[in-house]
Amino acid sequence: MTEKSKAYQRARTAEHFAEREKMILTSTRILMDREGIENTSLSAVAREVGLAKSSLYRYYESREQILVALLQEEADRMIADFEKSLSEPKSQRDLTGIAKLWAKVCFAHPRLCLLASQLSPILEHNLSTQRIVEAKLQFLHRHRKMAEILTAALPHMSEAGALAAVQYVFTIVAGLWPMKADRKNSLAALEHPELAHLKMNFEDTLASAIELCLLGILAKEQNWEPVLE
């Protein structure tokens, strides 16, 4: 029996239900990579999985809920990779090195960056209040895990400062990703002499922003004040 034909069978236990949810997320990931997020509709997901659209509602109440669940899954992968990279003997533990590593790991997870950029303007708009509360609590759990990893690498930074840094960086990623010109017309437009300065390397720009963020938090915690005169 194929995976898609299995999906037609009604999930009757918690274990089967979890298997169906995992199958739906896997199919959504494949569909989004192939067709783009704009074409990842609930009907398209149902076809990819091999379920009737009406059956899909047993597992997720909307397309947006599926994409938020996929974002959580991608975040778990990114966090695991960040922790693994920091544990490697050759990894740099200074601010610049950590910022570059963090940016590199983010760039290696384009689905995470894309979904993060869609979260507030689009994905949360079709979720119930309860689903938004659940999602934000799940994000907070992951942000705290990321903050723990960060404080292990930067022991002079407080837990509160590390958590703030993680939340700031998530917001920066969400804002920077749409500016990463990767469409043919956008790339062609940036060849205009007066627009050349708008060309942006996402990873380098993110690394610089992360370094400034970490430096600012450490400076504030250590009561450093710049000379403005």
Image: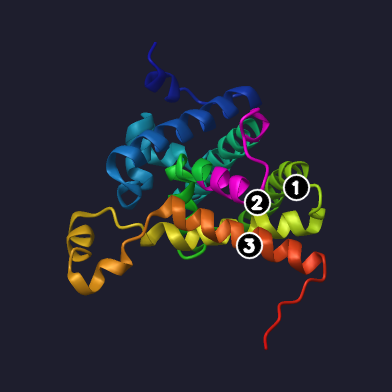
Q: To which quarter of the image does residue 31 belong?
A: top left
Position of residue 177 in the picture relative to residue 72 (left or right): left
Residue drawn at x 73%, y 48% is 147
- Residue at the location (43% across, 44% down)? 110
Mark 1 nearby-residue class (10 Å; few <14, some 14–19, many ≥20):
some
Please indicate, yes or no, whether residue 21 appears anywhere in the rendered image. Answer: yes
**Kind of residue at badge 2:** Leu
Q: Are the residues at dot 2 and dot 3 in contact (C-beta closer than 8 Å)?
A: no
Q: Are marks 2 and 1 in contact (CB under 8 Å)?
A: yes
- Tell me where residue 106 appears, x and y as whole percent: 51, 45
Amino acid on which disc 1 is placed: Leu
Indicate left or right for 80 with 124 as reference: right
Work out how far the residue at label 2 is from the one at label 1, CA to CA, in angstroms.
8 Å
**Residue pointed to by mark 2:** 95
Say which quadrant the N terminus sits in.
top left
Residue 84 - label: none
| Residue at the spot 70% in from the left edge and 52% down from the top edge | 140
Q: How far from the left and from the top, in percent, is residue 66?
A: 49, 44
User: In the picture, which quadrant includes the C terminus?
Assistant: bottom right
- Residue interval drawn in magenta: 86-103
Secondary structure at numbered mark 1: loop
Above or below, comparing residue 23 to residue 106 in the picture: above
- Quadrant in the picture for residue 161: bottom right
**Residue type highlighted by circle 3:** Cys
Using the image, determine if residue 160 lies above or below residue 141.
Answer: below
